[in-house]
């Protein structure tokens, strides 16, 4: 063999070495090629014992959603689902909602500025920085909400013009001619039941006023839902004081010149004055309070002011039944509400079992104590909760009545806990066609009571006002 090898000419040996060198260089070019490098399925050096030539597919994968999460993702992500004023447990349950807020704070903390190289700012400065950034994002979301609301109002205005106005002519100018108002209304309230089977004190109250502000077609509808030891006293106090403040301001104000702004100011000032009077009334509101929803009907216009989880809706029929929401439930895990609570030193968290799993809806707590455990983010009273971001400022919604709007329903969460908006309007519509407002109230109250008996060991207080439109 050696003799045979020695007979190879230098030219052939050189050509063989050159060919082998070209093959090695070609393989190296393939490894460096951008078209091949990202594939996790190609191994360009099968004979490499060290494995250094293999492609690390993990490094070529895009970063996960968790790694790419930033402040805007946390802020703008839909974090909960609500039905019948209950929080549905999903992947984004109340515990995860709290974790999202904490992750946001951790992100802020990671990006905090340093006063000097290698020297972190003091905890007081960090807290101030956190609050400023949360406030900035909070304001950004408020602006986005206002833009969306303005767009919705524009669409409603276009629909109103289409429904109200006929062909343009000298005898038929382009103005609104139809007059829509409440024809009649009725209310009903029943007390709940304790787990012992004993009837409890009814902590709900309501107010129904026709000729509100001396005008025939102006109505006032209010439902308050008390909670805590003295919740019934708080609800009764609000039922007596709040309508008086609002009516007094309406009579004294020339609201027809700038009605929207004037009514908004009247609502906010009246709610604030009522809460101040409540704190000075002698009623112990340390851990007691009340939610309240108010609807004022000025002929074609409705104004709704709400704090808490009582609710007002409209049943509309336009080829089919649909729901128009006049109010929004104020739950602690709504991001805008949760951001305010965290900013003011509170925390949002559900009850937990022995294994740490969340039970029931999200609640408001002090950061260093397990009190008050309030399941809403706005209310009258609730002094301890007010120290950590629970407020009495109402959210106000204006609604222009349309010929397709048939009736208004205002009720405490005793109605909404187990009855959906859609089921409620379908039930009431059957009574609306017969003009039976009293029958509609009786039906809803009885249905809600039966639902509580099936779904829970107790029965909440149940209150409803139904107004038929003409």
Image (cartoon, grey):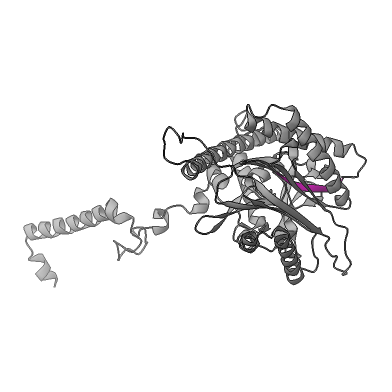
- Look at the image and say whether residue 294 sits in the magenta stretch: yes
Determine if residue 220 is in view: yes
Q: Quadrant of residue 463?
A: bottom right
Looking at the image, residue 238 lies above or below residue 7: above
Nearer to us in this view, 391 or 76: 391
Q: Is residue 51 left or right of residue 250?
A: left
Nearer to us in this view, 10 or 459: 459
Q: Position of residue 364 (x, y in %)?
A: 75, 49
Residue at 80% x, 57% y is 189
Q: Is residue 301 left or right of residue 439?
A: left
Looking at the image, residue 56 lies above or below residue 287: below
- Look at the image and say whether residue 272 sits in the magenta stretch: no
- Magenta span of residues: 286-295
Q: Position of residue 318 (x, y in %)?
A: 51, 55
What predominant SS class does the magenta segment belong to? strand
* Quadrant of the rendering where the N terminus is positioned: bottom left
């Amino acid at each position: 063999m050696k003799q045979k090898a020695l007979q190879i000419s230098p030219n052939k040996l050189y050509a063989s070495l050159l060919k082998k060198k070209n093959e090695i260089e070609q393989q190296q070019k393939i490894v460096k090629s951008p078209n091949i490098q990202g594939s996790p399925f190609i191994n360009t050096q099968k004979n490499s014992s060290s494995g250094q030539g293999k492609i690390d597919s993990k490094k070529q994968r895009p970063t996960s959603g968790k790694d790419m999460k930033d402040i805007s993702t946390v802020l703008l992500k839909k974090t909960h689902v609500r039905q019948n004023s209950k929080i549905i447990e999903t992947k984004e349950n109340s515990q995860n909602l709290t974790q999202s807020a904490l992750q946001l704070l951790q992100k802020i903390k990671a990006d905090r500025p340093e006063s000097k190289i290698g020297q972190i700012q003091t905890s007081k400065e960090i807290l101030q920085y956190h609050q400023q950034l949360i406030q900035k994002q909070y304001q950004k979301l408020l602006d986005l909400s206002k833009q969306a609301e303005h767009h919705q109002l524009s669409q409603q205005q276009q629909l109103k013009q289409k429904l109200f106005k006929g062909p343009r002519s000298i005898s038929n100018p382009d103005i609104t001619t139809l007059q829509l108002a409440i024809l009649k209304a009725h209310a009903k309230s029943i007390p709940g039941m304790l787990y012992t089977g004993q009837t409890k004190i009814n902590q709900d109250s309501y107010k129904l006023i026709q000729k509100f502000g001396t005008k025939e077609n102006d109505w006032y509808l209010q439902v308050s839902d008390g909670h805590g030891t003295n919740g019934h006293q708080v609800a009764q106090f609000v039922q007596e004081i709040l309508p008086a403040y609002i009516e007094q301001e309406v009579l004294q104000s020339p609201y027809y010149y700038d009605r929207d702004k004037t009514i908004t100011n009247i609502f906010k000032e009246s709610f604030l004055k009522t809460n101040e009077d409540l704190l000075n009334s002698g009623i112990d509101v340390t851990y007691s309070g009340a939610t309240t929803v108010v609807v004022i009907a000025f002929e074609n216009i409705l104004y709704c002011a709400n704090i808490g989880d009582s609710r007002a809706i409209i049943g509309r029929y336009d080829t089919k039944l649909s729901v128009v929401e006049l109010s929004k439930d104020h739950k602690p895990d709504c991001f805008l509400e949760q951001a305010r609570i965290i900013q003011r030193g509170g925390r949002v968290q559900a009850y937990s079992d022995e294994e740490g799993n969340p039970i029931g809806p999200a609640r408001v707590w002090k950061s260093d104590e397990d009190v008050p455990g309030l399941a809403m983010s706005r209310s009258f009273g609730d002094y301890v909760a007010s120290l950590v971001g629970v407020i009495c400022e109402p959210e106000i919604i204006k609604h222009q009545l349309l010929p397709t709007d048939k009736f208004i329903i205002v009720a405490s969460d005793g109605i909404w806990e187990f009855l959906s908006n859609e089921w409620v309007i379908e039930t009431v519509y059957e009574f609306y066609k017969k003009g039976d407002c009293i029958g509609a109230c009786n039906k809803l109250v009885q249905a809600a009571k039966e639902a509580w008996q099936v779904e829970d060991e107790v029965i909440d207080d149940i209150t409803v006002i139904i107004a038929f439109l003409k």
